[in-house]
Every structure is written in C-alpha cells, then in structure tokens.
Image (tube, rainbow, N blue to C red):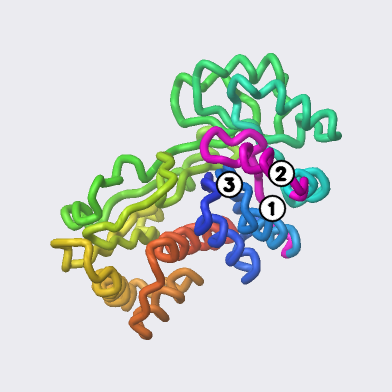
C-alpha cells in the first residue's frame, strides 16, 4: 500500500480529485491529506473520492495552515456541519491524527463521535511523542505512520514507512536542477515489506517543507518520476533555458515541456498527468505553476498505483 502525504493546498487536492473522477486512483493508493485550509476544493475533493469509491485519509489536527481558524470564523456553521455530517460518517474518509501535544483532545473527540482507535491512522514525526503510542493508542491504531529512522523502532504495530525522498534532491533555485537532470528517487516500494512495514509513504515530488505562498521563479522545472531497469524510481528534471530573469513564464514552460516531450518519445509514459503535459506541448499553452505541480503529482500517484496493482 502507498500512502502519499500531501498538504491540502489547492493543486495537491485537485490532483487527487482528478485521479478519482477519472478512475486513475488505485485502491492500493490512499492519499493522506493534512488540510491547510477549510476550502471548497477540500470539500469537493473529499466528496469526489467518496463518490468514486476510493479512500483518503484526512488529518484531524493539522499542524500548519489556517484550517482551524477558518472553521471557527465561519459564522454560518456550514463548515463544521460538513465535518460532522460528511467527514465523520463517510467510510471513504479514514480519520488520521498527527501525534502531538493536542493528540489526546482530538482522539477523545473522535472516540465520542463513535470512531474507534482501530479505525484511526496515527502519524508520528516527532520522536518525543512516541509514548502516545502506548498511552493513548495501546497498539490499536489502524496504521502507524513513522519515519524510517532507528529512533522510531519502538513502534512495532502495523507500521507505514514515511520518507521525504525529495528532500535530498530539492534545490533552492530551479535552475540548479540543470546540474543533475536525472537522479535516484526511491526504492521503498521494493523493500518495505521485507522491512516489516505494511506500506510506504512519501511527500511525492513536493517534499515535506510547507510554504504558504510561492514566488515567480527564474526557471521553470517539471519533475517526473519513472521506473529504472532495476524497478527503482528515478526522477528526471526538465528545466527551462531562458533563466536570466522572471519574464515570460509561458516561454520557460514551453522550453521545459518540450524537453519532456522529446524524452517521453522513448520512455512512452502514458499516465493522465503525462497526457495532459503532452496536450500542453501540442497546444503551446501555459497552464500556470500550480497546474505543473498538479500534473506531476497525478503522474506519480497513478504510476505507483499501476505498479502496486501488478505486484
């Protein structure tokens, strides 16, 4: 099982929604969403996943963003009503908790609403909170998502291996990806079961670090994962050439997507995300930076789903 960990920003959510509505989200892929805003996009994504009979995990206590403040400021009460009447009662939405000092409060709330610990995913990213595994969950979580680090080995039950595979590759400037255009990404999908994990998780081609706003880049980069001959995952970076200033992002994108098109002539990747990139190449249209990220995530999740359906 693959559990991609995504922050609930607009284009990450739309990536999941479009995969679900096009029947390209494998049942062996369960996105974990840390909602950073209480938006209509979040609502529509959760509904689309449920309507198309897929599953998604929603974190009850996000640690970044404005999710809680927006819910509290909603004077109509519709957002809280949606939480109670749709999220809680919908079996397609797995409830998840980021283990933190507020864990007990959120766990109690879920228990009072009839959600048993055995139906909750607990996520550990801080070594100091491992005791909650014993004090609150009593080894009865649905899954325990933990970093692939020795300091988390005390957690033994139904573990999901979490890694930020993009972190070692991430550059401060997009133009720097030109220095190494093709790199190893991950082989977690090959060995997680041998290491006694029930599944694996990563932050896709976005990475763990959370940024609430973007900026106009000097270079446009497209990150595409693919399987090497040994079935490990590699990532190819397609970077624009006219990178002296921030002007003409449409030109920069076409330079990058042209490289992707030429490369894919031999690779013959055919996911929904790649198909959309090819259409943009043919029409010479510029979709904006958010759509570029959306399509790259869509491709990654669909590719992993296709792999897991075959093994």
- Tell me the residue at 42%/60% (across/down): 293
- Tell me the residue at 30%/59% (across/down): 236
Mark 1 neighbour class, 10 Å CA radius: few under 14, some 14 to 19, many 20 or more: many
Labels 1 and 3: the sequence-earlier one? 3
Residue 289 occupies which quadrant of the picture?
bottom left
- Tell me the residue at 34%/59% (across/down): 223
Up-down relation of residue 133 to residue 86 (above or below): above
Mark 3 neighbour class, 10 Å CA radius: few under 14, some 14 to 19, many 20 or more: many
Alpha carbon of mark 1 to alpha carbon of mark 3: how far? 20 Å
| Left or right position of 222 against 85 | left
Q: Which residue is mark 2?
A: 94
Labels 2 and 1: the sequence-earlier one? 1
Mark 2 neighbour class, 10 Å CA radius: few under 14, some 14 to 19, many 20 or more: many
Specify start and end residues of the magenta stretch as a single range: 52-78
| Left or right position of 78 against 215 | right
| Left or right position of 273 against 68 | left
Q: Which is nearer the eye, 189 or 261? A: 261
Up-down relation of residue 4 to residue 244 (above or below): above
Tags 2 and 1 touching, CB below 8 Å: yes
What SS does tag 1 mark? loop
Residue 55 is marked as 1
- Tell me the residue at 56%/56% (across/down): 13
| Residue 311 appearing in the image | no
Q: Which residue is mark 3?
A: 37
Query: Where is residue 300 drawn, in percent x and y?
Result: 46, 58
Query: Where is residue 103 drawn, in percent x and y?
Result: 66, 24
What SS does tag 3 mark? loop
Alpha carbon of mark 2 to alpha carbon of mark 1: how far? 7 Å
């Amino acid at each position: 099982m693959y559990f991609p960990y995504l922050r609930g920003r607009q284009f990450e959510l739309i990536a999941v929604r479009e995969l679900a509505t096009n029947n390209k989200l494998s049942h062996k892929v369960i996105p974990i969403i840390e909602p950073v805003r209480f938006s209509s996009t979040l609502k529509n994504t959760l509904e689309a996943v449920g309507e198309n009979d897929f599953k998604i995990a929603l974190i009850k206590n996000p640690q970044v963003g404005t999710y809680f403040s927006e819910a509290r400021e909603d004077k109509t009460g519709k957002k809280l009503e949606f939480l109670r009447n749709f999220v809680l009662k919908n079996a397609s939405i797995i409830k998840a908790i980021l283990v933190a000092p507020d864990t007990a409060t959120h766990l109690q709330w879920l228990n009072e609403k009839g959600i048993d610990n055995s139906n909750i995913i607990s996520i550990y990213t801080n070594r100091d909170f491992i005791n909650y595994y014993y004090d609150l969950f009593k080894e009865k979580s649905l899954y325990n998502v933990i970093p692939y680090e020795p300091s988390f080995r005390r957690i033994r039950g139904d573990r999901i291996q979490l890694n930020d595979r993009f972190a070692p590759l991430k550059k401060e400037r997009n133009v720097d990806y030109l220095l190494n255009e093709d790199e190893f990404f991950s082989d977690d999908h090959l060995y997680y079961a041998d290491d006694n994990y029930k599944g694996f998780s990563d932050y896709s081609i976005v990475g763990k670090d959370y940024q609430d706003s973007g900026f106009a880049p000097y270079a446009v980069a497209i990150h595409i994962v693919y399987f090497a001959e040994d079935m490990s995952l590699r990532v190819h970076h397609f970077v624009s050439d006219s990178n002296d200033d921030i002007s003409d992002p449409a030109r920069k994108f076409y330079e990058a997507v042209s490289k992707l098109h030429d490369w894919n002539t031999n690779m013959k990747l055919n996911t929904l995300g790649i198909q959309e990139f090819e259409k943009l190449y043919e029409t010479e249209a510029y979709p904006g930076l958010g759509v570029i990220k959306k399509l790259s995530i869509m491709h990654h999740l669909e590719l992993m789903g296709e792999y897991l359906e075959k093994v």
